[in-house]
Amino acid sequence: MKSRAATASLFALLAACASAPPAPSTPPPTPSDSAPPPEPTLAPPVPSAPVVPTPAANTADAAVAEPPAPKLIPICDAKCDKLVSKCSKSSVESCRLNCGKYDPPPTGCAAQVQAALECARDAKDLTCANVAPESCAAKFREIAACSSGTSTQTAAAATGIPDGWEVYTDAQNGFHVPLPKGGSNKSDTEHAVTAPDGTTYTVTVMQLPKEKPSEKSLLHFMMKVQGRCSDKLKLDGFIEKPGQTSIHYKSHCPDKTDWDGMIYIGAKNLILLSVQAPTGKIGVTEPFFYDFEFTGS
């Protein structure tokens, strides 16, 4: 009986312990009762990539940089293509070789070169001679002015006459033409001057031809004028425009002299421009040939 009572007491005690509420835990300390919390740890900053300036940011370089040069050779070749049907093979080849001097153009002058070549390509007075058309002379002078640093205004005022030259004016026969200084009249119809380099320039006033000017009629005319020197005579660049006809000629004489020149036919007379020098030593000709002008007097 005693053991059964002791067992019952043990079960009662265990039951009481199981049903009793748990002892309250110690409350967390208040902020005022504890040390301040540690500062939060921040992740180290990620370094940013260095800023690399782009080429466009350099405004000084951008201002100096020149735009890509236009393709100039095709423009020049198009001009030469127009000579194929009316000029000799050698004239066309010379034209194409001359195109090479514009590739590349002078620094900073691509626009002037393009304008001059386009003018020559479209010119109606394009000649077989390897010179700029008369109608485009001013634009080609702008190339020279640009490459030498001359202003556009100065280029427009330039006469294109070399140093030591002057404009010879014949008011009676109605024309003017650049010539080396120091010339003299051989007669009423002929003016001549010999330059320091030995080249002789002659201007001869002649009567109008009876036949209508043409390459054939002017060839016969020059054969009579030059005699034996006409054995190797060549004419090229025949141009007709209102009030004026012109053609370029070249010949080689048996005495080993070369002749080069122009024939200009106006309303009143024929003007023969001739340049003579030992073979291979002819001096400047372009101003003499292509700055000639009838004055209309």
Image: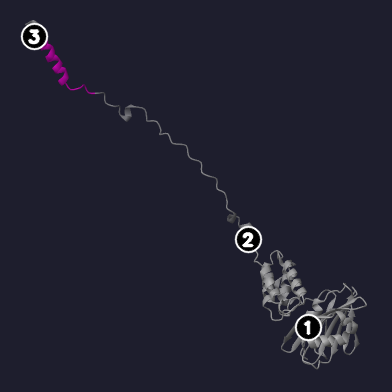
Residue 43 position, x and y percent, is: 45, 36
Q: Is the stretch drawn in magenta largely helix, strand or loop?
A: helix
Residue 280 position, x and y percent, is: 87, 72
Name the amino acid type tagged 1.
Ile
Name the amino acid type tagged 2.
Ala
Task: Say which quadrant the C terminus sits in.
Answer: bottom right
Please say whether residue 16 is one of the residues in the magenta stretch.
yes
At numbered mark 3, what does the secondary structure look like: helix, strand or loop? Answer: helix
Of labels 3 and 1, earlier in sequence is: 3
Which stretch is magenta? 6-24
Res. 112 in view = no
- Residue matched to label 2: 63
Tell me the residue at 77%/73% (across/down): 90
Separation of marks 3 and 1 at Cα, in angstroms:
155 Å
Q: Residues within 10 Å of mark 2 (few under 14, many from 20)?
A: few
Of labels 2 and 1, earlier in sequence is: 2
Tell me the residue at 82%/76% (across/down): 285
- Residue matched to label 1: 247
Task: Check whether the beta carbons of the residues at disc 3 and disc 1 lie within 8 A of each other.
Answer: no
Task: Say which quadrant the N terminus sits in.
Answer: top left
Query: Looking at the image, which residue sits at the far bottom?
Result: 210
The label on residue 5 is 3
Give the quadrant of residue 261.
bottom right
Residue 93 position, x and y percent, is: 75, 71
Query: Looking at the image, which residue sits at the far top?
Result: 2
Q: How many numbered marks have been drawn onto this rendered protein structure? A: 3
| Disc number lying in front (2 or 3) | 3
